[in-house]
Each structure stands twice: as structure tokens, then as C-alpha cells.
Amino acid sequence: MEDQPQLIAYRNLLMRYVSQDSYSMSEDSELLSGALRARGVSPDDLVNMHIDVLKNVSSNLDNATLRSLYFLSKIMEGYGSEYREHQTLKNRQKQLDTELDVAAEVQKALLEGKVPACSFADIGAISEPAKKMSGDYYRIVNDGGRLAVTIADIVGKGIPAAMCMSMIKYAMDSLPENSQGAPPFILSSLNRVVERNVDPSMFITMFYGVYDPLSRVFSFASAGHEPGFYYSASKDQFEELEARGLSLGLAPGTRYKEYSREIAKGDMLFLLTDGVTEARTDNGFIERKDIVDLIRQSMHLPAAKMVKQIIYELKKMQHFNLHDDFTFIAMKF
């Protein structure tokens, strides 16, 4: 132990303290303290080090003082054991955090939505997780004839929710987009997947819609998802894009109803998850009319800039401390 650098540094500092040389004492002690913690020196090791140094620097230690120090060393053994256990847990936590970072990057690569090129609509979409991993998902597909849009939110957090949403993504990829891709069919098919494969404690809300530019009709169905907004350019007013249906995974054999709305030139559609509508401000939860106000303030922008501006304003209201995942989609026709 005599040759250990931390023991030598501790001895030198203690000798200066004993001799009442206070030069840079505070700064040196803080530096040494940090170095000792970094090297994993536990409380009982530190007490024993102190005893060893005292015995070397002072020849007139009385028996009572020495025995009291040995007593302190014995007492500190329990603290030392807890300290070492704490350090082990910290190291494991660092490893888990690193693995979670990797998993989050993998999930982002798997689920990251892309906005396709579209000649008949200006589309913007943005999704931001509250934590490292997201329970939101969106998917926009332009098959050359129709525009299909999906937005979903899993009731649950963390890795299980993220894994579940990854499963939904691959289930969506395996479903047809053309003749059999009617919204009720899509939701019924996914409901069977969720009901059979997802833990009963979790369920998924989803909105699925298809826009046909020839008929100018937007057909949609909902599985318990947060209602979106429809903006009528001719009336200059907003309406809720509401549809009823059970969330995915709640009951086998659930059937979903198809809704439709004619879309005129200049109309807009807005889809979102409940992380947007349940944003918490200093005055409580945000109201849907507040979201409409935010949309009105930025609806002159291109869709991609509009969604970024709206999410920024919502985050600012929460002091950039998100409590839930945010996903917002804007479609301008």
C-alpha cells in the first residue's frame, strides 16, 4: 500500500494539514477526493489509509486515539460494502444505458417514418420520443394512385412498448395497400395480430386513412385513436376528424366502421397522438382549441415547416420537458 500513488498523495496532504500549511488545501483536497472516488476507494479503505498515514507522520499517537480510529474503521466496513455494491450497480446501469442507446438507434432506424413525394398533396410529419424509445408510429405510403396514412400510439412505455410497435410496423408492411386495403380491413387484420401476440396489459390506438385523388375522398377508420382535425378552406373552419372503434388488442373479432370525407382544394387534414393533446403547461393540460390556434398561426407554411413549428411551440409550453411521445402529421391538398 505504501507505493500506491493515492496513499502518497494523501500522506503529503495530511502532513501539510497537520503542519497547518493551508496553502491550496481546499483545492487539493477536492482534487484528491475526486481521484480517490474515480479509483473506487471505499470509505473503509479511506479510513485505513488515514490510520496508516497518521502512524507514519505522527509518533505520539495515544492509545485511545488509535483505538478510536480502529473502531471507526470497523464501523466503516459496512459502509464500504454498500459503497462497493453501489459502484457495481452504477457500472451495470452505465452498461444498460449504453445498450439502451443502441436499441433506441435500432428502433429509430426501423420505425423512422418517411414522407413520400406526392403531386396532389403537401405532406409534413414529425415524431419525437419523450424518452429514448418511442411508443408512437406513423407510416405514409403513396402507391402511385392513392395515399395511405397510418398513425398509432401504444399504451405503455419503455422497451416492451418499443418492441410491440416494431411488430406493428412489420405487420403493416405485410398487409396489402391496394384492393384489400380498406381502412376497416387493415384495422381488423392488425387487431388479430395484436390480440394474439401482445401482452394483455398493453393495447394500441391507431388511425388509418386512404385518400383517392380521383374521387377526392378521404376514407378512414379508427381504433380508439385521438381524433384529428379537418380544415375546410371554403368555410375557414376546423372540425374534428372523429371516428369510433375499439383499440387494437382489446377484443378478438372487433369490426371497424369506415368513415369518409370529401376533400376540396385548399382543405387540410391533421393527425396526431395524445402526446400532443395531453401536453402539460404551467396552467394544466393543453386544450384542443389551443392546438387549432397553433395550426392557424403556421398554416401558411409548407407542411414540413408547419409540423416543426407546431411541435416546437408545444415543447416550449412544457419547458422542453416532454411527458409523452409527440407525433404530428399535416396534409395540405
Image (cartoon, rainbow, N blue to C red):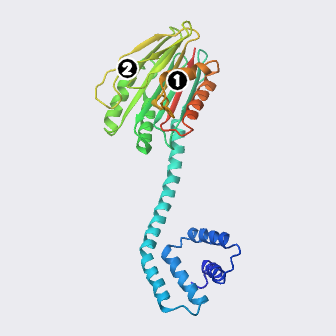
Residue visible at 45% across and 76% down? Answer: 76
> Which residue lies at the image location 42% right of the left edge and 77% below the top edge?
75
Dot 1 or dot 2, earlier in sequence: 2
| Between 144 and 127, the one nearer to me in the picture | 127
Label 2: few (<14), some (14–19) or many (≥20) C-alpha neighbours in 10 Å: many
The type of residue carrying mark 1 is: Asp
Q: Do we see residue 114 in this rendering? A: no
Is residue 299 depicted above or below 19 in this figure? above
Label 1: which secondary element: helix
Please tell me which residue lies in front, 192 or 178.
192
Residue where numbered disc 1 is placed: 290
Q: Report the number of numbered marks.
A: 2
Q: Residue at x 37, y 25 (%)?
A: 224
Across and down, in percent, residue 226 comes to 43, 25
Is residue 287 shown left or right of residue 32? left
Tell me where residue 55 appears, x and y as whole percent: 56, 89
Q: Is residue 247 rendered to the left or right of residue 9?
A: left
CB atoms of marks 1 and 2 within 8 Å: no
* Measured Cα–Cα span from mark 1 to mark 2: 31 Å
Above or below for 176 versus 171:
above
Q: Which mark is residue 184?
A: 2
> The C terminus is located in which quarter?
top right
Tag 2: amino acid? Pro
Question: Which of the 4 quarters of the picture holds residue 24?
Answer: bottom right
Q: Measuring from the top left, give residue 66's x and y in whole percent.
A: 49, 88
Residue 298, image x, y percentages? 62, 21
The crowd level at tag 1 (other Cα within 10 Å; few <14, some 14-19, many 20+) is few
Rendered position, 141 above or below 13: above
Quadrant of image for the N terminus: bottom right
